[in-house]
Image (cartoon, grey):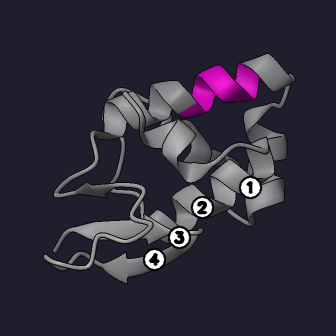
Amino acid sequence: MAFIIIHHHIWGCQSGNHHEIIGCMDKIDGVKLGKKIKEFRGKQGITQERLAELTGTSYKYIQRIEGKTPPDVRLTTIVKIAKALKVKPTDLLNF
C-alpha cells in the first residue's frame, strides 16, 4: 500500500483526492532516508542517542536506520524523527 502525508497526518494513498498531498510513494528507499536523517542530525549536532531519546526509539534502531541495510521504517516514525530534527517529513523524503 502506498501512503500520503497530509499536514503531518498519514493516510492511505488513493487516486483522485490530491488536495494538499505532499507526497505519495510505493516504497521508501531506506538507505537514502538514513542518509537524509544523518545529514540533518549532523547539521544540528544531534547524536544518534539523543535522536533516539527525542523519538522514543532505541539508539540501536536509529543506528540501523542510518546503516547500510536499514529496516523498513513506518511513516509515523519518520514523522517523529522529522519533528525531533525540526524539519518537515518531506525534507527527509526528498532524495
- Neighbor class of circle 2 (other Cα within 10 Å; few <14, some 14-19, many 20+) is many
- Using the numbered discs, state the Cα–Cα distance from disc 4 to disc 1 in whole angstroms: 14 Å
Contact? badges 3 and 2 (CB < 8 Å): yes
Q: Secondary structure at mark 3?
A: helix
According to the picture, the residue beneath numbered tag 1 turns out to be: 83
User: Quadrant of the rendered structure where residue 53 is?
Assistant: bottom right
- Using the numbered discs, state the Cα–Cα distance from disc 3 to disc 1 in whole angstroms: 11 Å
Q: Which mark is residue 76?
A: 3
Q: Residue at left 36%, top 27%?
A: 95
Q: Which mark is residue 79?
A: 2
Three-letter code for the amino acid on which mark 1 is drawn? Lys
Q: Residue at left 36%, top 29%?
A: 32
Contact? badges 3 and 1 (CB < 8 Å): no
Three-letter code for the amino acid on which mark 3 is drawn? Thr
Sequence-first tag of 4 and 2: 4
Contact? badges 3 and 4 (CB < 8 Å): yes
- Neighbor class of circle 3 (other Cα within 10 Å; few <14, some 14-19, many 20+) is some
Q: Residue furthest front?
A: 19
Contact? badges 4 and 2 (CB < 8 Å): yes
Contact? badges 2 and 1 (CB < 8 Å): yes
- Left of 40 or right of it: where is 36? left
Sequence-first tag of 4 and 1: 4
Q: Is residue 23 magenta?
A: no
Of circles 3 and 4, which is in front? 4
Three-letter code for the amino acid on which mark 4 is drawn? Ile
- Using the numbered discs, state the Cα–Cα distance from disc 4 to disc 2 in whole angstroms: 9 Å
Instruction: Report the magenta residues as a range.
Output: 37-42
According to the picture, the residue beneath numbered tag 4 turns out to be: 10
Where is residue 84? Give x, y as percent: 78, 51
